Image: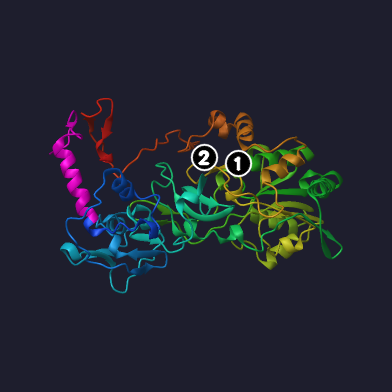
Amino acid sequence: TPAKDGTVVVTNSAKVKANQNFVQEGILLDHPVDCPICDQAGECWLQDYYFDYGHQERRADIRPFTSTRRELGPHVSLFADRCVMCSRCVRFTREVSGGGELMVIDRGSHAEIDVFPGYPLEDKLSGNVNDICPVGALCSTDFLYQQRVWFLEAQDSVCTRCSTGCATQMHVNQNQLYRVQPRYNPNANDWWMCDVGRYENQYVSAPERLDGPRLRRESAWEAVEWPLAIREIHNHVADVALHHGGMKLAVVLSPYLTCEEAFLLASYARSILRDVTLVVGKIPVVGRDETFKAGFTIRAEKCPNRRGVEEIARHFSRQPLDWQTFIHSIGSGDILGAYITGGYPDAWIDDAEAEQIRRVRSLVVQDILPSPLARRADLLIPGVTAFEKDGSYVNHAGLIQTSTWGLRPHGGAHVDGQTFADLLGRKGIYNAGEVLRELAAEVPFFARCAAGVPPAGLNLLTGQEKRPRSTELGTVSHPTPTFRSQASPMLEVDAQTQ
């Protein structure tokens, strides 16, 4: 029946219910009810339907497949006996990622999902097929048998592995990160995320994480308590500014800082002397932007908040420096002291560059992992990852989104925002929401954030963000008609959601 405005959809007639029962019975002929051993248990729609509507009795004994696990790629495991042949995964590789690695082989009751011979599913979006599989036939190899989902706590977050800024959700239990999944946001990533943001988060629990402040005494490191560390940070940076002038001190705002943290750190720099030099931290760029068939793009810019940090730096400083100019200024003697924030999940600086920076008289480094620069610091301050703090990020398109902490800070580290608030002499516990309102009141670029940021974010450049809605796999570029449900006249159903 052609879809058109005003069509009445009947969802509760005897004929409809009989057909629904028949469809569910047909699906369960090919799907074993082995929920206790399935990784999808607890978040499986078919499991919910089975327990809601019954069908415990089987009228036919059809089991074309036995329970065998097969690897379709480095991150995807196939359990063929659970597959209900919805073909969502096949459509994804053809319509979204564009690789077309998955296909349906054989026909009838023997049809199954497989990869083309010699072409494993190893593109950069492969993990998404695990998300869209409704029954646990495709499972994440990395998450398989790690946790039952009802033990996991979910927190909304933002991926920090590139400037797309995918809306994500972290799943944690007992302060351990088990998985990261995409969260639908039509303004950023739609339903998808790349495998780097999904799987490459081992740095969060790396044993070499910096876990406490350390002060260099002659040639040895000495662990210090946080109150002393805060005083030492101020002593190191203020001494340079007050004795040699504010322009001789550089405060580096990492593109991995949240907007709130960058605002507090820039405020602290201005509180020392108004002419302290602000630097936008090193922007990691790898290759070129990679755009897939449906438009999803993995950005070459591998940091989450370059635009937000730049706007804050420009507000507080007439001419903030970029990273290369900062390095050159050290060589020419224009910079004598530096407070550098990091937070990079990957190696970001080499020995040659670190040795050039070490020429300053006083060097404070705040980072999450050891690096050539951290080893040369006079004072080393541990930072935290995006999974361990609240805050907001502005992506490449000017969309600001908020992220919520799900893990407690590693070891003895403090949240970066708390460190900067302590430097400013603020009392109490750091609150990102309050700082965001303060930021919106002072920096015009962030003025729209005064009332908060909705789940789908705010576009600070155009103000034309979309509102999220529940949809099926795929995208539609044309308007869709609206149906009215006879079962619930108050319910209007968008055709694209059916």
Query: Residue 94's quadrant in the figure?
Result: bottom left
Q: Is residue 247 above or below residue 11?
A: below
| x and y, in percent, of residue 54 in the image | 26, 46
Left/right placement of residue 204 relative to residue 79 reads: right
Residue in the foreground of this view, choosing between 63 and 179: 63
Of the numbered discs in the image, which one, if any, rests on residue 374?
none
Give the colour scheme of this rendering: rainbow
Q: Amino acid at mark 1?
A: Cys
Q: How many marks?
A: 2
Q: Is residue 186 left or right of residue 458?
A: left
As drawn, 4 above or below 51? above
To which quarter of the image does residue 220 belong? bottom right
* Dot 2: element: strand
Pointer 2 residue: 400
Q: Is residue 38 left or right of residue 487?
A: right
**Residue wearing tag 1:** 259
When the figure is inspected, residue 359 is found, relative to residue 156, above or below; the finding is below
Q: Nearer the viewer, residue 33 or 334?
A: 33
Q: Quadrant of residue 20?
A: top left
Viewed as shown, does residue 30 lie left or right of 352? left
Say if the magenta span includes residue 18: yes
Name which of mark 1 and mark 2 comes first in the sequence.
1
Instruction: Give the residues drawn in magenta, as a range.
Output: 1-28
Cβ–Cβ below 8 Å for labels 1 and 2? yes
In percent of width and height, residue 363 lies at: 77, 55
